[in-house]
Amino acid sequence: DTEVTQTPKHLVMGMTNKKSLKCEQHMGHRAMYWYKQKAKKPPELMFVYSYEKLSINESVPSRFSPECPNSSLLNLHLHALQPEDSALYLCASSEGPSAGELFFGEGSRLTVL
Amino acid sequence: GDSVTQMEGPVTLSEEAFLTINCTYTATGYPSLFWYVQYPGEGLQLLLKATKADDKGSNKGFEATYRKETTSFHLEKGSVQVSDSAVYFCALSNAGGTSYGKLTFGQGTILTVHP
C-alpha cells in the first residue's frame, strides 16, 4: 500500500465552525507533513511530525492545530478560519524526517465562507 | 537559504513535441533533487529523483540529470502526449543544510499539450 488517504476531499465551513482534516498512511513512514497550496502555486509547508512529535511549525496561525494520534494518522483541526485560508490542504509522508521522497495525498479542498 | 528557480510558464506544445523545463537551484551541501507532477484536481506525485551529482532520474519517458557544475536539474521528454498536461514542480531536499526536514519547491510550470 503506497497511498496517503485524506478525508474529506471537499469541505465548506463558516468562520465560526470547528472542523478537522484527516490523513492516514500505512507505509510505516515515520514523518508526516501538512502543506497548504493555493491555486497555481507551489505547496507551502505548515507542519512536520517526526516519530509522532511535532518537529517543525512554520509559524502557522493557532487557528490551525495539528495532531498526530499515532504513527499512521495525522489530523489538522480548524477553528475560526478566515476566507483567505481557503486552499488545498495536502498531507504527505516520508520514510524518515530528512524529507527526501514525499508521498502526497490527493488533498482536501477547503472553502471558508 | 535554499531555493529553486523554474522557467516561467505556461508552456504549450503540440503532441509529439520535445519538452524541456529548466530548473536551477541554490543550496549548501549535497541536496537531493526531485520533479513532482500535479494533474488537475489531484495531489502531487513524484515523477523522478536524483540523489547525487551526475545521477539521471527517469520515469514515464521523462528524464533529468543532476548537474552540480551548473546547479541544474532540467526536465526533458522526447515526445509529449496530451495526458502529460499538468503542473510540474522542481524541488530539493537538503538534509545537510538549513532546510532539514523540508522540501523546497520551485514555482511550478504549467504544461498544456494539444492534440
Image (cartoon, coloured by chain):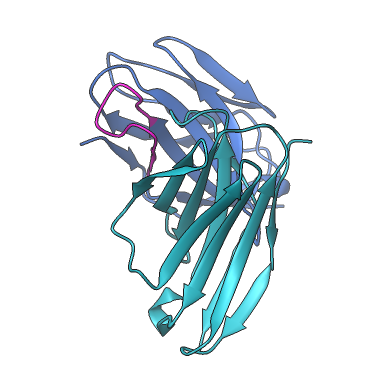
Residue A83 position (above or below residue A22): below
Give the magenta part as a residue range. Answer: B93-106
Q: Measured from the top left, where is residue B90 in percent x and y?
A: 44, 38
Q: Is B82 situated left or right of B106 in this image?
A: right
Q: In which quarter of the image is the N terminus of chain B?
A: top left
Residue B107 painted magenta = no
Judging depth in this view, the residue of A18 and A3 nearest the camera is A18
Residue B94 painted magenta = yes
Q: The blue chain is which one?
A: B
Q: Measured from the top left, where is residue A93 in percent x and y?
A: 57, 40
Main SS class of the magenta portion in the image = loop
Judging depth in this view, the residue of B60 and A34 nearest the camera is A34
Judging depth in this view, the residue of B25 and A106 nearest the camera is A106
Image quadrant assignment for residue B71: top left
Judging depth in this view, the residue of A4 and B28 nearest the camera is A4
Image quadrant assignment for residue A84: bottom left
Question: Residue shown at 52%/68% (left/top)?
Answer: A77
View extreme (left): residue: B1
Q: Measured from the top left, where is residue B99 in percent x and y?
A: 30, 34
Q: Can residue A50 be seen in this view?
A: yes
Q: Which chain is cyan?
A: A
Q: Is A59 situated left or right of B115 in this image?
A: left
Question: Residue shown at 33%/31% (left/top)?
Answer: B100
Question: Residue shown at 44%/45% (left/top)?
Answer: A48
Q: Measured from the top left, where is residue B112 in percent x and y?
A: 59, 54
